Amino acid sequence: MILETTSKFRADSEIAARDMIERFRAEAAQKGYTVKKAGYERKVKKAKGEIVAEVWVVSVTQVFSDIWEDLV
């Protein structure tokens, strides 16, 4: 039985990263999980000191079941 998972996704903008987190929170009850932790981080790629690309890495921890749920 899966208790929780942490997944990482790539977003092309900060707005897209925020929207992705909000979608996970909105879908949580329908899909049978809760969002334990969610956030995003900006990553940049540089060449010769100049930024040539940037992305946002979204991390979401989904909790599907409590460790004691079926035992008590």
Image (spheres, helix red, strand yellow):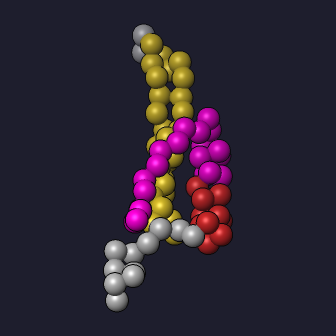
Q: Is residue 60 left or right of residue 1?
A: right
Residue at 54% of width from left, 38% of height from top? 10
Residue 2 magenta-drawn?
yes
Point out the residue furthest to the top here: 48
Q: Position of residue 37 (x, y in %)?
A: 44, 61
* Residue 34 is at least partly visible in this image: yes
Residue 29 painted magenta: no
Q: Position of residue 11 (x, y in %)?
A: 59, 39
For the point 39% across and 75% down, the residue is: 66
Relative vertical location of residue 31 with respect to residue 53 in this rendering, above or below? below
Please tell me which residue is depicted at 46% across the width and 49% down the height of the picture: 7
| Foreground of the two, 34 or 46 | 34
On the question of residue 37 being in view, the answer is no
Give the quadrant of the C terminus: bottom left
Where is 64 relative to 24, above or below? below
**Whole-percent x and y of residue 47?**
45, 13
Answer above or below: position of 72 versus 11.
below
Residue at (53% x, 18% y) in the render: 52
Q: Which region is colored magenta?
A: 1-20
Total marks shown come to 0
Where does the N terminus fall, quadrant-wise? bottom left
Q: Residue furthest bottom?
A: 72
